[in-house]
Image (cartoon, helix red, strand yellow):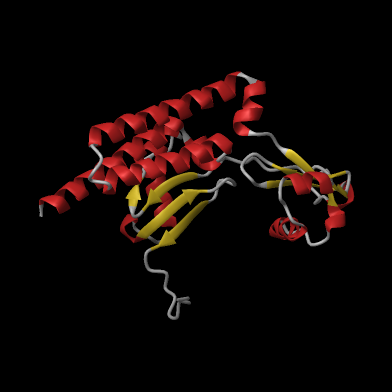
Amino acid sequence: MEHIVELVGRALLAFLIMMVIARLLGKQTIAQMTYHDFVAAITLGALTANLAFNVQMKIGHMITVLLTFTVIAYLLMILALKNRSLRKWISGQPTMIIQNGKILEGNMRKLKLSLDTLNQELRERNIYNIEEVQFAVLELNGEISILRKPEYLPVTRKDLKLKAGRQWFPIELIMDGKIIQDNLRQNNLTIEWLMSQVQKKGLTIAQVNYAVKSSNGQVYFDRYDDQMPNPIDKE
C-alpha cells in the first residue's frame, strides 16, 4: 500500500513540475518545437517519467536534474532571442525547397524530404498541381509555407475594389451555459444588452450552451436542445 501511495505522490509531483516548466518555457515551445525545444521536451519528458516511476532514484536528485535541464533550456531560448548567429545553431533556420517554381533537390536531400511528403503537404493546402507553387519553405517547426504564383492566388475584395465591412475580434459571451462577465466588461457590453439578444431569439440563458459575438457583429447562439430528431453519430 505504501508503495502505491508513493507512486501516486511521485506521479502528481512529476505532473505539477512539468506544468510549471511548460509555463516557464512558454507557448512557443509547444507550438513551434524547434531543435532545442524538441531536445528539451524529450529530455524533460524522460526525466519526469523517471521521477514518477523509478522509486530507486531519490526525489531530490531527480528534481535537481529536472531544474538543471529547465535552466539550460530557458537560457538557450534567451540566447536564441538575443543572438541571430546562435539562433541559427540552436533553433535552426528555414530552408527553401521550391524557388521560382523549381524544386531544389539538393535541399530536399539534406532535409531527408521525399517528393511524396512534399506532395502530401501541398495537398493539405489544397494544392494539387505543383506548377501553382512559386515558393515553398520548410519552417523551423517542420511546417511547409507556400506562396502560389500570382495567377493562382485567390481574388480578394481589394482586387475587385469592393468596400470591406468593419470587423471585430469575436467575443465569447456565454460558454457552457455561464455568462462570461469579464468579456462583457472588457468590451463595454452589459448584461441587459445580452439578455435582450437572448430574448430576441426567444430563448433564456438556461437554454443557451454557447454564445459569441462574431467578427461581423452578429450574435450566434447554440442551444442545449439542438432539436435534431436524428443526429449523426459516427463511432
- Outermost residue on the bottom side: it is 230
Q: Quadrant of residue 36?
A: top right
Quadrant occupied by the C terminus: bottom left
Residue 115 at x, y percent in the picture: 77, 58
Residue situated in front as seen by the camera: 160 or 176: 176
Residue 170 makes an appearance in the image: yes
Q: Quadrant of residue 21?
A: top left
- Residue at point 53% right, 41% down? 38
Query: In the rendered image of this protein, does residue 18 appear above or below residue 230?
Result: above
- Outermost residue on the left side: it is 1
Residue 222 at x, y percent in the picture: 44, 60
Query: In the rendered image of this protein, does residue 211 appear above or below residue 37?
Result: below
Left or right, 140 with reference to 181? right
Residue 160 makes an appearance in the image: no
- Outermost residue on the front side: it is 56
Left or right, 127 with reference to 67? right
Query: In the rendered image of this protein, does residue 72 appear above or below residue 29?
Result: above
- Residue at point 23% right, 37% down? 58
Residue 157 at x, y percent in the picture: 78, 46
- Residue at point 57% right, 45% down? 215
Residue situated in front as seen by the camera: 122 or 217: 122
- Residue at point 35% right, 39% down? 19
Residue 24 at x, y percent in the picture: 41, 30
Left or right, 123 with reference to 103? left
Residue situated in front as seen by the camera: 189 or 92: 92
Left or right, 194 with reference to 146? left
